[in-house]
Image (cartoon, helix red, strand yellow):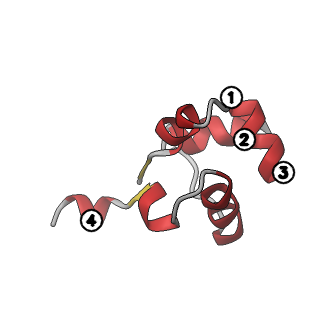
Amino acid sequence: MRTRIKELRARYDLTQDDLAKKVGVRRETVLYLEKGKYNPSLKLAHDIAKVLQTTIDDLFIFDDEDNQ
């Protein structure tokens, strides 16, 4: 899974720490999400998408979609 978190976070001039505080997780969680090393819960994915003013589908790119 790939994400657009870093790209969208930059659009709103948010640091990893800023985003983490807004969604109630540690900065390391945001780092792991950006690197594709952590799969978020549906609630966390929803919360991040809401903060970044996008949809979950636009935020996360799943590997099976890349191969189509």
Q: Is residue 22 above or below residue 42?
A: above
* Contact? badges 1 and 2 (CB < 8 Å): yes
Coordinates of residue 36 in the picture (x, y in percent): 48, 45
Q: Which mark is residue 24?
A: 3
Q: Secondary structure at mark 4?
A: helix
| Quadrant (top left/top right/bottom left/bottom right) for the C terminus | bottom left
Q: Disc 2 marks which residue?
A: 19
Question: Is 61 left, or right, of 40 in this rendering?
Answer: left
Residue 55 horizontal side relative to residue 46, left or right: left
Mark with earlier residue (4, 3): 3
| Marks 4 and 1 in Cβ contact (< 8 Å) | no
What distance separates the C-alpha of mark 4 from that of mark 3? Answer: 29 Å
Q: Residues within 10 Å of mark 3 (few under 14, many from 20)?
A: few
Tag 3 secondary structure: loop
**Image quadrant containing the N terminus:** bottom left
Residue 31's label in the rendered image is none
* Mark 4 Cα shell of 10 Å, populated few (<14), some (14-19), many (≥20): few
- Secondary structure of the residue carrying tag 1 is loop
**Kind of residue sitting beneath label 2:** Leu
Residue type indicated by callout 3: Gly
Q: Nearer the viewer, residue 52 or 41?
A: 52
User: CA–CA distance between discs 2 and 3?
Assistant: 8 Å
| Mark number displayed over residue 15 | 1
- Mark 4 or 2: the one toward you: 2
Q: Residue at 66% x, 40% y: name it.
A: 30
Say which residue label 4 marks: 65
